Amino acid sequence: MLTPKMKSLISQLWDNFWSGGIANPLTAIEQISYLLFMRRLDEVDSKLKKDAEWTGEKYNSVFTGKFISPVTKEKLNKQTLRWSHFKQLEGGEMLTHVQAKVFPFIKQINGGNSVFAKYMADAVFIIPKPSLLVEAVNIIDALYSEIEKQTQAGQTFHDTQGDMYEFLLSEISSSGKNGQFRTPRHIIKLMCELVSPKMGETIGDPACGTGGFLLGAYQYILTTHTSKNHITEDEDGFKHGFGDKLTDKRLWAALRKKTFFGYDFDTTMVRIGLMNLMLHGITHPNIERSDTLSKKYNEDNYYDVILANPPFKGSIDAGDINENLSLKTKKTELLFVNRIINSLKIGGHAAVIVPDGVLFGSSNAHRNLRKMLIEDCELQGVISMPSGVFKPYAGVSTAIIVFVKGGSTERVWFYDMQADGYSLDDKRDKINVNDLPDIVKEWKVRSKNPNDDRKAKHFFVPVQEIVDNKYDLSINRYKEVDYTPPQYDKPEVILNKIQGLEDEINKEIQILKELK
């Protein structure tokens, strides 16, 4: 959880970029991400080196050897490219050093043929003034000092860094860039609990943005391979671990290189997503620039797990829509669910956030999608979320749908989430009421404890009833609400009360008249 000081430092960082001439939030976060990456790269390398010395293993530092700058043509000692080195330079020298030497170095950090290098090839470091760079470096150092304090107080490093990065990313959402709204991390954690991603599975997100769902799945898998004495619980009630039981290097290699796959249509978001995953330990992330609704994308029957929060609004040109998408519509919120179904292997699981309109919309495309979820998949659950979950960036009402590709749907589990642990206003302050732990608990025992009480928070609905209601998946269609008719006094009692009030008013008026 971010301290007030950290929030203040991040706000100061934004203000400095704005006054320094970088007003576009997406551009600013990209430049800030480069600096965070430089800082974290130095820190991680130093830690791995110390760990290797302690275990007696050999470690090849990324800062070992020489680097020839493509800008200056100099043969540089890589040690001079560390954050800890260049942060001590004078402002003008620091800016030149970072622009011409450090930035070209990090662009190819995973090798010239890596996905990271591919999307960083035309990236540009555009911080224009020495003073802005010096200020940014100092603030980022101060932020990491605060993270260290939080870590010593019991928070995990990745959680606090994740909170910091999300707070930075929220500026993109508030500006409405690309219609993207970040998914709160506690909702991501909930969705990971619902689909339980496992080691060895391929996990994807067809509209990954900054990679939040991929990181959530990564953290979930690490936690399932952590010793009980190393498990911690966060403020939202979710367990965390760091994977100490993963002792086979081949498993770590598979996890970091061959497990997580994301796509986004915006190059800047791809770069940010790549850096975000690398900052969190996924050393060789697989995030590509692609419009997964277009004809150019063809990865059907590929993923074991998909976690996603696709764009809620917008449409695509009919001529660009992939012919394998069977829905006759241009609405992206429908097409993305169609894409996710196609991309899953038979038996693959998905948890997807959709706007409420997907659940009850009356168009043929809406009904056909719901029919697809019921008849071509096993629709396991619909978790209705309150509209404030995405505030202050959006007030739209949403739901999480959970399904398995293939099989048949016999009944659907509904849950009426009324609180997510935060106030549902723009402030989103932490509160004590939180349905998320209960959702996880009830989800895991739902088959052993079937509940048909429509007045409860969660209950099952038989599939035939859903079909009879034109495949309507809105919880309000099925939930029963206790209604107690209001009790009114008899008319003569009400009239007597009114007469008494009128007499009292007349008395007060008479007193006022006598005062004249």
Image (tube, helix red, strand yellow):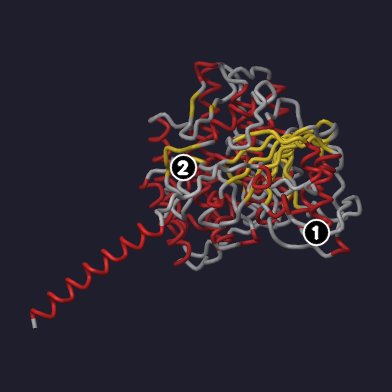
Say which residue appears at 64% left-offset and 17% top-offset.
247
How far apart marks 1 and 2 lie (CA) works out to 59 Å
Of labels 1 and 2, earlier in sequence is 2
Looking at this rendering, what residue extends furthest in the left direction? 515
Say which residue appears at 56% left-offset and 48% top-offset.
386
Say which residue appears at 73% left-offset and 33% top-offset.
259
Residue 220 to residue 72: above or below: above
Q: Nearer the viewer, residue 359 or 201?
A: 359
Q: Position of residue 292 (x, y in %)?
A: 80, 51
Looking at this rendering, what residue extends furthest in the bottom direction? 516
Q: Nearer the viewer, residue 331 or 189?
A: 331
The image quarter containing residue 296 is bottom right
Q: Position of residue 178 (x, y in %)?
A: 66, 61
Q: Residues within 10 Å of mark 1 (few under 14, many from 20)?
A: few
Numbered disc 2: secondary structure: helix
Q: Position of residue 118 (x, y in %)?
A: 74, 49
Looking at this rendering, what residue extends furthest in the right direction? 323
Q: Residue 46 has which mark?
A: none
Residue 380 to residue 114: above or below: above
Q: Which residue is mark 1?
A: 363
Report the amino acid beneath label 1: Ser
Report the amino acid beneath label 2: Ser
Q: Which residue is mark 2?
A: 84
